[in-house]
Image (spheres, helix red, strand yellow):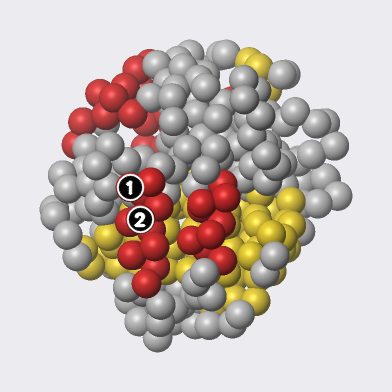
Amino acid sequence: MPIHLSSVSRRQFLVQSTAALAGVSVLRIATAAEQAETTTLALVSDTHIPQTTDTVARGVNMTDNLNSVVREINALETKPAAVLFNGDCAYLKGLPEDYANFSDCVQPLIDAGQQLHMTMGNHDNIPNFYHALKAQRPEKPLVTSKHVTVLETPQANLFLLDSLMHTNIVTGELGEAQLKWLAEALDARADKPAIVMAHHTLHMGPIQEGKTIGGIADTAEFLEVLHARPQVKAYVFGHSHVWAHTKAGDLDLINLPAAAYVFDEAQPNGWTLARLSDSGIEFELQAHDKSHKNHKQVFAVNW
């Protein structure tokens, strides 16, 4: 359920195609020069922000980690056209106090004129999110009970989906209505490459009755929509706290690292700098640990 915290700067602007600036669902992102060769995006996943700033999990202070990410993004020489938070903004149960802390953390991005967009993960709670950020409630959802967003850039279109099924339930779900909308939205924008993003991982195997899965329950239906449309080049997700680049047929799968903690000590945590061009998109790892062997590693998706 993407939420938008908007602030317009001289170097970038949003031309909306629906509703008012707060809570819009289709946005056109551009730099002052529409002919810009690249569009830069900052991608942040799995921040897991708790209600108190001193809370530690798995040896990590999540608030400190997000504050570090915010400082690094604001210090970039080239200002991103947008900052995308891909789910699990809150720690475990999406408490109102979690989002109050999260709001405080991202305020410096807003003060710096950054465009922010957020999706919900399985540890989020959308009513509590809206309670903390009342002005961000979307006025005209594109899908009933699911809040999706389209970001149109000069090089490609990004589709931010809602895979939250129930708060603090690990399984994700897109649902029939959202998949129908996605197919129609992709068909309406077949002239540019498409990047699809949601919080949850795919679930590639069969679903066994009575067994909980960690990924998207309707993965088969989701992939059917994506594979049928050649302009879809990549699916970007978080959830697993892993930094990886794999494939599902011709579809590139980009697993964003967690900004908070990792489950496997060999994995990096941090955030990702993405660069869109006419020939593809590059994802560059910005690890918290600058000495990690994968810091600055680039995954490229070409078209």
Determine whether label 1 and label 2 are within 8 Å by CB: yes
Three-letter code, disc 1 = Ala
Locate residue 302: give its quadrant. Answer: bottom right
Left or right of 177 in this view: 40: right
Three-letter code, disc 2 = Lys
Using the image, determine if residue 117 lies above or below residue 211: below
Residue sitting at 29 percent across and 24 percent down? 127
Task: Tell me, yes or no, if residue 104 can be seen here.
Answer: no
Q: Which residue is mark 2?
A: 180
- Looking at the rendered structure, the secondary structure element under dot 1 is helix
Q: Quadrant of the N terminus?
A: top left
Picture coordinates of residue 237 (x, y %)? 58, 47
Q: Residue furthest bottom?
A: 35
Left or right of 185 in this view: 43: right
Residue nearest the viewer, comparing 84 with 19: 19
- Looking at the rendered structure, the secondary structure element under dot 2 is helix
Q: Residues within 10 Å of mark 2 (few under 14, many from 20)?
A: few
Locate residue 210: give its quadrant. Answer: top right
Residue nearest the viewer, comparing 290 with 82: 82
Q: Quadrant of the C terminus?
A: bottom right
Residue sitting at 31 percent across and 44 percent down? 147
Residue 177, label in figure: 1
Picture coordinates of residue 22 (x, y %)? 20, 47
Using the image, determine if residue 54 lies above or below residue 192: above
Q: Could you tell me how far apart the alpha carbons at marks 1 and 2 are, in whole angstroms?
A: 5 Å
Task: Tell me, yes or no, if residue 27 can be seen here.
Answer: yes
Residue sitting at 19 percent across and 65 percent down? 17
